[in-house]
Image (spheres, rainbow, N blue to C red):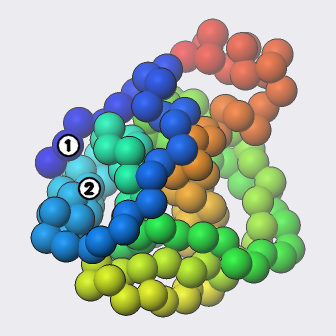
Amino acid sequence: MFEIVKYPNATLKKRCSPVNIVGKEERDILQKMAETMYRSRGIGLAASQVGINRQLAVIDVGDKRLIKLINPKVVESNGAEIMEEGCLSIPNVYIYIKRARRVKIKSIDENGREYNLEATGLLARALLHEIDHLNGRLIIDYLNPIKRFLTLKKK
């Protein structure tokens, strides 16, 4: 298992590097990330949140289906809904964020095969949240500077 990197660690703001070859190392990292996510009672975890600068993420929104993502990209999104989000890297901070209601992503699985995934609701939100992490974007980046300052000051 890994330790979760906490804000304001600069690692969280870096865009992660793409994975070129999927092998045992990547599968091991994904497995340890999943263990860390479950131990922390999260529903998603990006590699940057454990100090690894690679485009890897795991998600399980509670439907007993662990999704492993390598180099995920949003290829389509539509609709919008506002929901509250939290983040394992910014404990005790919850922010209402407007995100697409439905998304289609393209990713690579742990065996190096490309796949598409369509999602709505909480899974769509979790996918977008983790992809944001891989691009160096945090939930507090959705706030204007004054709200961000006040939110983090309360923390």
Q: Is residue 82 left or right of residue 8?
A: right
Residue toward you, 43 or 128? 128
Q: Residue at x 80, y 20 (%)?
A: 145
Image quarter of residue 51: top left
Residue 28 image point, x, y percent: 15, 63
Residue 64 image point, x, y percent: 33, 79
Residue 140 image point, x, y percent: 67, 32
Residue denoted by label 2: 33
Residue denoted by label 1: 2
- Identify residue type, mark 2: Met
Image quarter of residue 69: bottom left
Res 116 visible: yes
In this view, 12 is above or below 105: above
Furthest residue toward top: 153
Q: Residue at x 82, y 16 (%)?
A: 146
Q: Is residue 60 left or right of residue 132?
A: left
Q: Residue at x 24, y 50 (%)?
A: 36
Q: Residue at x 27, y 73 (%)?
A: 22
Q: What SS does tag 1 mark?
A: loop
Sort mark 1 into few (<14), some (14-19) or many (20+) by Cα contacts within 10 Å: some
- Identify residue type, mark 1: Phe
Res 31 visible: no
Sort mark 2 into few (<14), some (14-19) or many (20+) by Cα contacts within 10 Å: many
Instruction: Say whether marks 2 and 1 touch (CB < 8 Å).
Output: yes
In this view, 109 is above or below 4: below
In terms of sequence position, does the residue under pointer 2 or pointer 1 come before the other? Answer: 1
